[in-house]
Amino acid sequence: MSWYLKIKSKIEKKDDSPELKRGQMKQILISEFERGLPEFDFLEYRNGCCTFQNTRIINGRNINEYLHVIFALKDRNFSCSVASRINKNYLNSNSYNSGLINPHIDLLVLKKGTGIIPAEEAYYFHNGRVKTTTEIIELIVNDFKEFGKSFLQKQAKQFENNDLLKTGFDFIENLEIDKS
């Protein structure tokens, strides 16, 4: 089956539930995240992206962990990513980053364990109906639990144990000038 037909079968899957109404997907997302990932608070909705945040304190620093879910009812797909940010200015940056300080990675890349994903597997697809979309959102929450939280835990350990980062932050703390 071609990638086009695979995607078409996902977005045309039949179920008897009502079609989603404007704003309903955001409500389902927030509800499912509150239930499945209660440590992540809904932070904002901007440009079709729901962002959820958890803050860890590591070595006396706030580390902001973000779960991003981009969706469009018309396109019938979700794009999800995980980020760990020291610098809050990167909250709405959609650039992926594999660096130590402000990493940001696609959730399906984490799940698949590869950076190259075929088009039919690169998104979470839904059919625009309440039942199927809710099931896909539950899958997204479970993937965040398994792969996203694991990524964030590894990131926290790296941040906590990296001697170069500790030395650099100690240096900054001991500067006698305006640190900003």
Image (tube, rainbow, N blue to C red):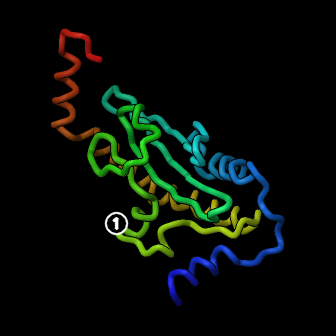
Q: Quadrant of residue 62?
A: top left
Check disc 1 and report the residue beneath it. Answer: 115
Compared across the picture, whether 61 is left or right of 173 comes to: right
> Mark 1 is on which residue type?
Gly
Q: Where is residue 101 in the image (x, y as percent from the top left)?
A: 29, 40
Q: Where is residue 40 in the image (x, y as percent from the top left)?
A: 55, 42
Query: Taking 123 as reference, is 170 above or below it?
Result: above
Q: Quadrant of residue 135?
A: bottom right
Residue drawn 51% across the image and 56% down it: 80
Q: Where is the C terminus found, in terms of image quarters? A: top left
Q: Where is residue 148 in the image (x, y as percent from the top left)?
A: 45, 54
Query: Taking 14 as reference, is 71 above or below it?
Result: above
Of residues 84 and 163, the one nearer the viewer is: 84
Residue drawn 63% across the image and 57% down it: 72
Residue drawn 40% across the image and 62% down it: 110
Q: How many numbered badges does the structure rendering display?
A: 1
Instruction: Tell me the element at label 1.
Output: loop
Of residues 177 and 9, the one nearer the viewer is: 9
Compared across the picture, whether 90 is left or right of 163 comes to: right
- 10 Å crowding of disc 1: few (<14), some (14-19), many (20+): few
Q: Where is residue 86 in the image (x, y as percent from the top left)?
A: 35, 34
Compared across the picture, whether 100 is left or right of 81 comes to: left
Q: In which quarter of the image is residue 14?
A: bottom right
Of residues 158 and 102, the one nearer the viewer is: 102
Residue drawn 48% across the image and 60% down it: 146
